[in-house]
Every structure is written in C-alpha cells, then in structure tokens.
Amino acid sequence: MRQEMAAMIALMVCAGPLAAQPPVFKSAQHDFRMVTVADGLDHPWSMAFLPGGDMLITERAGRLRLVRNGKLLPAPVAGVPQVLAKGQGGLLDVVLHPKFATNHLIYLSYAKPTGGDSLAATTAVARGRFEGGKLSGVEDIFVALTKGAPGHFGSRLAFDKDGYLFITVGERMVPSTGDLSAHPAQDLSNHHGKIIRLFDDGRVPPDNPFVGKAGARPEIWSYGHRNPQGLAIDPATGEIWETEHGPQGGDELNNIRRGLNYGWPVIGFGVNYGTGSAIHAGTIKAGMEQPVHVWVPSIGTSGLAIYNGNKFPNWKGSALAGGLSGQQLVRLTVNGKNAEFAEILFRRQGRVRAVREGPDGYVYVAFDGEDKPTAVVRLEPVPRR
C-alpha cells in the first residue's frame, strides 16, 4: 500500500509541471504552443521588434508600450501623436526603419483628427526617433486625402528590400451604392481604398505608376481596395501580399502589383450586411484584378506575415493570415503570384489583429479583445514524438 501511495505521489509531482504548460496545438506540419509575451493590453494593434530583444506594441487607445527583458513596462512611451481613438480609429501600426540600428527611426500609422466634428479623422503616418525609451522629433510624413466614418482606416505599413514604404488606406466606409465605377476607391484623385508607395521620408518616388497623370495622386501604387488590414512583403521574392476585408463575405488575399485596379466595389464576392442583397454586378471585369484567395464567409482578415524563419521550417514561404471575426490563424502556401489554402492553425483563441515573424524565427500574434484586455503571444514549436 505504501509503495502504491509513493508511486502515485511521484506521478503527481512529475505531472504537475507538465499540466501547467500551455496546451499543444496540432497542425499538419508543426505542433506548437502559445506562450504569453505581454498581457493586459487594451486593443493591441501591432508590434515591432527592437535590437536586443525588446518589443514595441501599439494600443488602439493611443499608447505605445514597451516590453523590456520580457516584461511589459507600466508606463507608455512618451511622444506619440494625438489620435482619434473612436470607432476603429486610434494608434494602429508600428514598423522600424530598415536601418533602425543606426538611425533609430520608427513609423506609426494612426487615425489623425482633422477637425470639423468629433469623429473626423484620416489615416496618417508619423515618423520619430526612438531613443532612451521615448520618441522625439515626431512628424507626419503622410496624411491621406480621405474622409468618412471613423472606420476602415487600413493603416498597415511595410518596407520592401529597396527601402520603399508601403501604406494601406481603407475606403473609409463610403457606401457601395449608385454608380460603383464612381466610388472613391475607383477614383485616383483621392486616397480612399489605395495602397501608397513612398520614400522613407514621405517623398514620392518618380517611378510611381501615376506620377504625371492628370488628376491622379502620385503616391498611389494600387487602387480598388476596401479595407486592407494585412500587408507583407515576401523576403525571398519581393512579392507584395495584402489581405482586405470584404463586406458580408468576400475577404481577399491579393498579390499587389504596380498600378493595378483590384476592383472594389465594382467587382467582389460579398453581399450587403444583413439583407444579403447584391453589391456587385459580378466577380470579374476586364482591367480589374482577381484575388488569389477568397474567404466566404468572411473571417475578418487582419494581420499578415510571410514566414521565412527556421523555427517552423515546413512553414517557410507560407502566408500567415489572421482573422478577427473568424478568430483564427490561417496558413496558405504562396508561390510567386499564386496562393493555395493549406490549413487553419488555430480557432477560437481570440480575435487575431496582427501577425509578425520575430527576428528569433518565432511567430507572434496580437489578440484584440472587444471588451476585455488581451495578450500578445509567441508560437513555439513542440517536437513530435
């Protein structure tokens, strides 16, 4: 009896630490755990990785937070520009300059108040120097020519290998009614539903597709988008990938190329909210690009990474796309201008707002809670036995 009791106690002691570990998620290529990096965050929207292992996290309410030595510092970073933290607006994306190690520049996208009324704002990008735990010399390098409801700001940022900055701008919830070809997302004289390409200081590259075209904004790289909240550049191929929200149905993964029209709202795969009535005359039209993947029903696409690390070698070259309403992380295999659905890595863990590959090769995910604080987590591989 004593031997049986001793064996049971030994088993409990051994099992205790294992039971305390995060659960294992199974996937086709790799099993993994979610390890919390920072918790108690107010609508975290994005994160960026600093040399030395620290991390910056944006909170939509207008706070830039710093994770240092594995701990979230209680005080937010000083020097952040004033934001309109209403609706879907606030402090949104954050990226480092490609030469951050020498120039200490970071970029923030945000809903910039424009006056007139308490909900008037547009998508803007500010640049500042991050040193000593604070920002200095903050100035806007881009302010979008848009107006509309306090939503669909887009706001994803990405640098390509040549140092050009790409910015997504949403269509600002302008209704898709009437003459759809006249919708602002189809109009090159504004920034509604556009992807922008700039030099790192906000100047317009002379080889942008609409430079010198009468009535067109020279900053535009592509147009006909709805609300692009995922943007990633494949480090191996240089291909630009984007995910955008459709209406009720019809979220898209697009391969973004110079000067092309991606169709919103003339073509698409979704319908009007609630009623289910048709928005588009069809899904195909000459001169308009087709998505490489469509989600019907929608998953509320937000956050996108093209994985290139070594922690998950069988995911290398995959697109990792987050879903808000779908509460999931999706993996797709991408090859040049093509993509194929591979698998759902997890479901029902929370609204995925951002997905990043860290410099350590792990995958980082920010969960955006609607009514409670949430976390940024790290996906870590678990060896299979």
Image: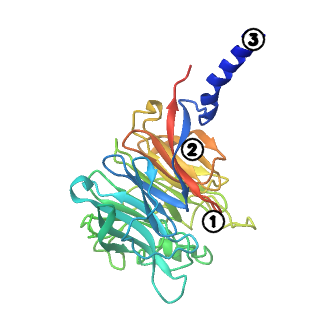
Q: Is residue 91 visible?
A: yes
Q: Which mark is residue 281?
A: 1
For marks 3 and 1, give the CA distance.
Answer: 78 Å
Q: Whole-percent x and y of residue 318? A: 47, 40
Residue 253, image x, y percentages: 52, 52
User: Which colouring convention does the figure follow?
Assistant: rainbow
Q: Amino acid at mark 3?
A: Arg
> Is residue 155 visible in the rendered structure shown here?
no
For discs 3 and 2, the disc positioned in front in the rendered view: 3
Left or right position of 70 against 368: left
Q: Is tag 3's residue or tag 1's residue first in the polypeptide sequence?
A: 3
Looking at the rendering, which quadrant does residue 126 occupy? bottom left
User: Where's residue 97, x and y in %?
Assistant: 29, 58
Answer whether labels 2 and 1 touch (C-beta < 8 Å): no
Quadrant the C terminus occupies: top right
Mark 1: secondary structure: loop
Pick the front one: 126 or 204: 126
| Helix, strand or loop at mark 3 | helix
* Residue at (41% x, 67% y) in the render: 109
Q: Which mark, residue 2?
A: 3
- Front one among 331 and 181: 331
Circles 3 and 2 in contact, beta carbons < 8 Å: no
Distance of mark 2 from mark 1, alpha carbons?
A: 29 Å
> Upstream in the sequence, badge 3 or badge 2?
3
What residue is drawn where x is 63% and y is 65%? 281
Q: Is residue 361 left or right of residue 298?
A: left
Q: Residue furthest left?
A: 102
Q: Residue furthest right?
A: 1
| Residue under label 2 | 330
In front of the other: label 2 or label 1?
Answer: 2
Task: Label 2: state its secondary structure.
Answer: strand
